[in-house]
Amino acid sequence: MADKITLGYTHVSGCTGCTVALADNYAGLLTLLDRYVDLKYMPTLADARHVQKVDVSFVEGSVCINDKLAVEEIKETREKSAIVVALGACACYGNITRFCRGGQQNQPQHEAFIPINELIKVDVFIPGCAPTPQLIRNVAVMAYLLLKGTKEQKDLATAYLKPLMALPVHGAACGESTACFCDLMTNVINQSLCMGCGSCSSACPVNAITMEYGKPQGERDLCIKCGACYNQCPRSWYSFDVVDNYEAINEAIMAALQ
Amino acid sequence: MGAELGKYKSCVSARSADKEILKHAQDGGIVTSLFAYALEAGIIDGAIVAANKEFAAKNPSKMMMDNSNFDMIEPWRPLPAIVHTKADLIAAAGTKYNICPTVSMIKEATRTFGLDKVGIVGTPCQMQAVRKLQLYPVGARDVGSAVALAVGIFCMENFPYQSILQLVEDHAAMKLESVKKMEIGKGKFWVYGKRGQVVQLPLKVTHKYEQPGCHVCLDYVANLGDISTGSVGSPDGWSTVFVRSKIGEAVWAKAMTDGVFETQPIEKVKPGLELVTKLANEKITKNKNTVEARKTFGIGKSLRIPYI
């Protein structure tokens, strides 16, 4: 297919776990690259490493504002990409890098790390530590449909991506989310919305959440601030338009990767 | 309205053909039989269900819990468990009427418990959680495709554990450990004692004890289950069954061929779909109003609404 979208991958302060998650789509990744996506630059999986003009950029990692190169790179990414996707919890919310206070070798003066949407406008969040291969895959397919699909496919992709596009607007930069277990307390339980399903507890990558009498109890010292609990919660954000059609959407995604 | 019963391919009134299951079932034994059949037929290799303390005492390896305060777990407190056999299913059968965080085990089911094909039963909101997790798997790597059969149960509202404690022990004046069965039906909350005593409470009494999070729920008949079921609409001892998805359709057809259920056309039974529709509309209308009221809850301030 000639009509591919161009993709770039900017890697700032992240552990490469997001890269691995992307690669863990295995055959699905090859199909994506074959048919839909032209990977222009990426530090680990492509020869070209420097930021280029692309349709979509994935950014892994938070930005160290004491690192001139990283700051330049993230700004350049914004300037050269139509759509910027924050991939993974560090890019979206800071995640574990929120706890850094510098002093580490060999750049002890690198002490301040912030999520990318505190420096640039971000269009889509793919939260999770690591983000799941399936969510990356779904967003990639939907981004393709949004840019190159028929009218119907564009509508579907718009509906699917809408909640993920709303996340940067409510993100850490706006003070509305700390991507901590506290989000569940302040935005779900304190808002009288929790119904005790346990999605949060299941989603937590560090098992910091247990269910006590049907409500989540967070061990905040364990929390790495990835935001998975809050984003997996069906009472954080929920689109009837999308989820009611789960069967057709799952089928469409699987068909795209056949 | 018209959408109150969700999308479905077929609807029948059914009950298990297995006498032993019926003896332990809340109504028609649909969930227990369906999972027992799915286990036997290899459709699932385990199911997440709402078990209890007695089950946990006998099967600690099928639960995920901190046993340090095991003695403090109360009667009728549901505990999510992974079951592998019909005997397990029967031990966990019956409605518990308070919150069971079933979805909390969905990832672990595919990890520690090693399941490739997971069955899960839950309320409409839990089905929503499962489907969101399949479409937007933020913290559920490789879990979505492992969900092989999701069975939804009709739900008007749920209760925190302490509400059930108060209803049974304070209002119905019975000890929780002496209760054999609880039921909501015919406009009443029924408590059946092990010695045969029956206490009924008008639903007016129970309303204030409901879980508040239920009041924004816009789904009564588990629209997102592969199959969904509940007593409403069918005669005593039978259940109304909606077959909804392609998976649900395939499993139900197979189960029918193998004689797992007795069925009657839903059009032939009383009170039938008319009552299901009425109650669905009642719930949805009431809760839509609650959602609407959140917008003007304060003075120039609103409460958060999760729906996009």
Image (cartoon, rainbow, N blue to C red):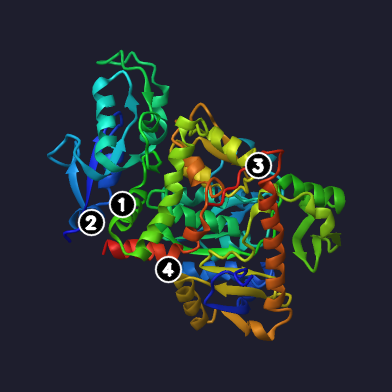
Q: Are marks 2 and 1 in contact (CB under 8 Å)?
A: yes
Closer mark to the observer between disc 3 and disc 1: 3
Provide the chain ID for the residue under circle 1.
A
Q: Label 1 belongs to which residue?
A: A140
Discs 3 and 2 share one subunit:
no
**Proximity of marks 4 and 2: CB atoms separated by less than 8 Å:** no
In the foreground, A75 or B8:
A75
Crowding around mark 2 (Cα neighbors within 10 Å: few <14, some 14 to 19, many 20+) is many
Check contact, mark 3 vs mark 2: CB within 8 A.
Answer: no
Taking the image as drawn, is residue A17 in sight? no
Judging by the rendered image, the residue that carries numbered circle 3 is: B302
Give neighbour class at mark 1: few <14, some 14-19, many 20+ (Cα, 10 Å): some
Q: CA distance from mark 4 to mark 2?
A: 37 Å
Q: CA distance from mark 4 to mark 3?
A: 49 Å
Q: Secondary structure at mark 3?
A: loop
**Label 3 to label 1, Cα distance in Å?**
35 Å
Label 2 element class: helix
Q: Against B116, is A228 above or below? A: above
| Chain of the residue where label 4 is placed in the rendered structure | B
* Quarter of the picture holding the C terminus of chain A: bottom left
What kind of residue is marked 3?
Ser
Judging by the rendered image, the residue that carries numbered circle 4 is: B42
- Mark nearest the camera among 3 and 2 is 3
| Residue type at the position of mark 2 | Tyr
What's the residue type where badge 1 is placed?
Ala
Disc nearest the viewer among 4 and 3: 3
Is residue A157 visible in the rendered structure shown here? yes
